[in-house]
Image (cartoon, helix red, strand yellow):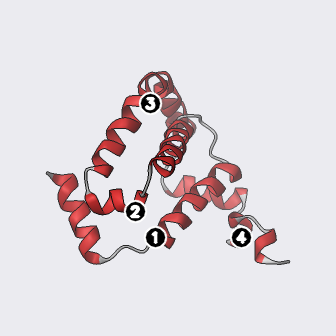
Amino acid sequence: MLQTEQTLFEQMRITELEIESRKALFSFTGGDVKALQSFKPIIEENIDKIVDDFYGLQTSVSEIALLIGDSDTLARLRTAQRRYVLDLFNGVYDLEYVNNRLRIGLVHKRMVLSPNFTCLRYTHSRS
C-alpha cells in the first residue's frame, strides 16, 4: 500500500493498544479525563481570548510573523488552534485524536527552525 493511502497512525503502526499503553505510561486515567472535561466550559467561554493572546505573542516576534506570512494564513491558524485547544478538553483520546496530533506535529517538523530562531523565540517567551 502506498504511503499516501495510509493515515499517519497507520504509517507509524500506532494502534488503540499502543495509545492505551502510552496513557498507562503517563498514569493518565479516567480521573484525568474527567478533570479535563470539567474545565471544558471555562475553556469554551474563554477560547477566543486564549487564541488571541497566543497569536498576539506569536506575531509580536518578527520571525514568527514572517513564517505566518499573511492574514488568510493567520485566520486558518487561529481556527486550527481553537480546535486544537478545545479538543484537549473533549475527553476523547482515540486514534482520530492521535492522528490529528501527529499531523500537527508533522507540520511543525517540516518547519525546520534554525537554532538562532529557536533561541530568540525562547528568550521572547520568557520576557
Q: Earlier in the sequence, mark 2 or mark 3?
A: 3
Amino acid tagged 1: Met
User: Residue 125: image x %, image y %?
Assistant: 22, 53
- Residue position for label 1: 111
Query: Which is more foreground, mark 1 or mark 2?
Result: 2
Image quadrant holding the N terminus, namely bottom right
User: Could you tell me how far apart the alpha carbons at marks 1 and 2 are, in whole angstroms?
Assistant: 9 Å
Q: Secondary structure at mark 4?
A: loop
Of the image marks 1 and 2, the number of the one nearer the N terminus: 2
Which secondary structure lies at badge 2?
helix
What residue would you read off at disc 2?
67
Q: Residues within 10 Å of mark 4 (few under 14, many from 20)?
A: few
Marks 3/1: CA–CA distance: 26 Å
Q: Amino acid at mark 2?
A: Leu
- Circles 1 and 2, Cβ within 8 Å, touching? The answer is yes
Give the numbered dot on residue 13. 4
| Residue 114 % position (x, y) | 32, 77
Q: How far apart are labels 4 and 1 at the CA level?
A: 24 Å
Q: Nearer the viewer, mark 2 or mark 4?
A: 2
Residue sitting at 27 percent across and 70 percent down?
117
